[in-house]
Structure formats: C-alpha cells, structure tokens
Image (cartoon, rainbow, N blue to C red):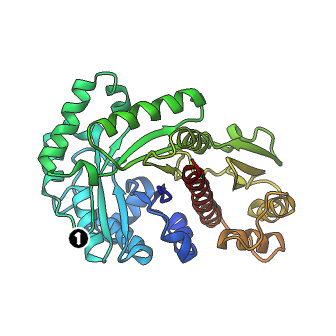
Amino acid sequence: MNNQYFPIVRAKQGEIEALDNLKSSVLKRCTPVFEVTKLDGQDLDRARKRSDTPYEDYLSSRAEQIAGVFKGRRAIVDVSQWQLGFTTEGGEQILSFLCNRLNDFGVIACPVIGYDRWESVEYREMIRTINLSDDAFFCIRLDSIALEDLGDPDHFDSVIEDIVSLVNISEADTPVLIDLGDVTRVSMQDIVESVEDAYSHMKSIGFEYVIMAGSSIPDSIEKAVRQVDSTGIVQRKEVIAWKGFMAANPNASLYFGDYGIRNPRSSDNIAPDMNVKIRYTIDNSFFIARGHSVRKEHGYAQSQILSRIIVESPHFMEGFSWGDDKIEACSRGELIGNSTNWIAFDTNHHVSTVVAEVREFTAQLQTISERA
C-alpha cells in the first residue's frame, strides 16, 4: 500500500532537529523532500566574512546536517528557490554540487527535476550529467506551470518525453510530485480536480509513482487565527482531498505529501513583532494556539501559557512524540524555546501524526478492498 509520507521541508535547523528526533518506526515511513533555501541577506554577509567560498560552505553544511539523520537513506532534494543557472564559487550548479556532497556523506541523494526549468539548456545539461548513486532516483516536480500546461497535453507530453529520453529514466520507477503549493484559497473541488487530472494523465503515459502535496496553513498567523491570545482550527484540505481521492480509487498509487507546519511562501526571517504560536496537527486539521508579539508581556515565555492550552485540550496526545514531550515540559515551566525550537517541536509532532494518519487510512482501505 502507498503508506509512505513525503513531507516537503526546508533543510534548516528546526526541521532537521524534528526529523532527527522521530521514532525509528516513523522515520522509515517518511521520505522528505528537502528544499535547500537560498543563502542571502545578512546570512550571506556573515558567511562572506568567514570564508572565500560561502556558498560551497553553506551547501556542504546543509548536506552534512541532512546526513546526520539520513545517512544510508534516501532523501529527495530540490533547489528551486535558487536562481536558474546559479553556480558555486567553483563553477558547479547548485543541485549538482549538493547531490555530490550528500553522496559524499553517505546519503542516497534523489534530485528533483523541475518541469518549469526544463526549457533552460544549461539546466537540462546539468541534470543529464548528474550521476545517481545506487538506489537513488530522479523525481519530477510538477508545479503550477506544469498543471496549467496539462490543458495543452501535446506540449506537456513533449516536455515529459524530452525529460525521459535525455535523462534516460524509467517512467515506472520515477516518482512524480504534483505540487499544489499554497491551497489556502483554493476550493476543495478545485484541489480534487487538479489531482485527478494530473494523476490520471501521468498514469496514462506510464508513470506509476505519483505524489500529491499542498499546504493549507496560511503564510501568517493572523490569517489562521485572527484574534490574539486565542485558538483556532485550520482545515488541512490537502489531506482531506487525498483521502477522498483514495476512498474513491482505493487501488490508486497516489502518495501523500504536504509542507509540514509551514506555508510554502512563509519567510525564514524572524519578524521583530512575531507572534508566539503553537501549530498542533490533529485529524484533518491544525489546532493553533496564538499568543501575541514577542515584544509585549511575557515575550517568548508565552509558549508556557500556550503549551498549557494545548495540553489541556482534548486534542493533546501525551507521550506520542518527542514534540509532544517538549510541549508538555513547556506547560510545566521546564522550557521556553525560541522560534527555531518551536518549528522543531511542531514539525516533529506533525510528521509523527501524519505518518500514523496515512498508515491507518491505507490499512482501512486495504481491509475494505480485501472484503470486496
């Protein structure tokens, strides 16, 4: 059954700590798509003061951190946030350099091929020259541009055929990621129709391994919970759509992915007036406890108040994950944590919850299928 989970996560400290603290039974059912974010702004300025090769040092550091969790395992890697054709100090394109470093550290690096980037000759040549390690694969990512191109199937198929022939990949063994991105303002019907169209078309041209992913969590806490110092529920439309599709097509090979507890467009920069918050994943939704600006009363220590709200709610799962243990410890006043810590705690609980959710749902489908 298609019970593997594919979270799209940033290759940053919070997410990597979250994955590092997963139970082994959870980790083996999780294949992350690591988005390696750009080095820019103040981080780039500081890196340039430390080294003459800031980009290579940064990418090597990301690779080493990923290897701390995924050495000997597969990890899908994507650099779509970097400018097309951007190269390291040594002249190597970012994705190629990153995959080589991951392989050096013992990770089975599985690079993403961006449909939206395929028109670049330089990009195509770089992808063609990547040497996969044993058990690695390419993953084709279909973003909004690709989904629009499905309206012109002849053009769409010509791009896919060119990828397959130039890279010499097998359709049956190459996963395709249907990336819906931010679906906060997309209706459930439109999500389902997009998935159905993309899935059926990819199956018709020989692809057997299809993943869908999206994010229902808004890019700012104000859009999720309007009132400060209150709670709210945000529906996870992407998982509801996946469950609905699978219930109607129980033998389909459609795998589930999402963006964890972050919106795809959310900034990595910590705003000076950031609201303290806990994003707690529950069945089909997020239960969110929102505080107020860190500049106001209690600052980051608000997390202890918010943790008590989570722990005292009917949603809390005592002892379920490392993230849950941290929330409970915070509720007792044993820790406070910063924004990076809470990304780690929330992400760890989220991944643990979704892995269990996917496993249980696919098991139910299998039982129903066997009875039929």
Where is 172 relative to 344, above or below? above
Q: Residue furthest right?
A: 312
How many numbered callouts? 1
Left or right position of 301 against 7 = right
Locate residue 315, reporting x and y percent. Answer: 79, 57
Name the amino acid type tagged 1. Asp
Locate residue 262, reporting x and y percent. Answer: 57, 50
* Residue at horizontal 33 percent and vertical 72 percent from the top: 107
* Residue at horizontal 38 percent and vertical 38 percent from the top: 143
Viewer-nearest residue: 77 or 315: 315
Where is 265 relative to 328, above or below? above
Mark 1 Cα within 10 Å, few/some/many (few <14, many 20+)? Answer: few
Locate residue 229, reporting x and y percent. Answer: 83, 48
Quarter occupied by residue 298: bottom right
Query: Does dot 1 land on a helix, a strand or a loop?
Result: loop
Left or right position of 186 against 79 = right
Quarter occupied by residue 83: top left
Viewer-nearest residue: 365 or 142: 365
Locate residue 134, reporting x and y percent. Answer: 23, 70
Left or right position of 292 against 125 = right
Where is 46 relative to 372, above or below? below
Where is 208 relative to 321, above or below? above
Q: Name the residue carrying label 1.
A: 134
Viewer-nearest residue: 170 or 90: 170
Q: Residue furthest top?
A: 152
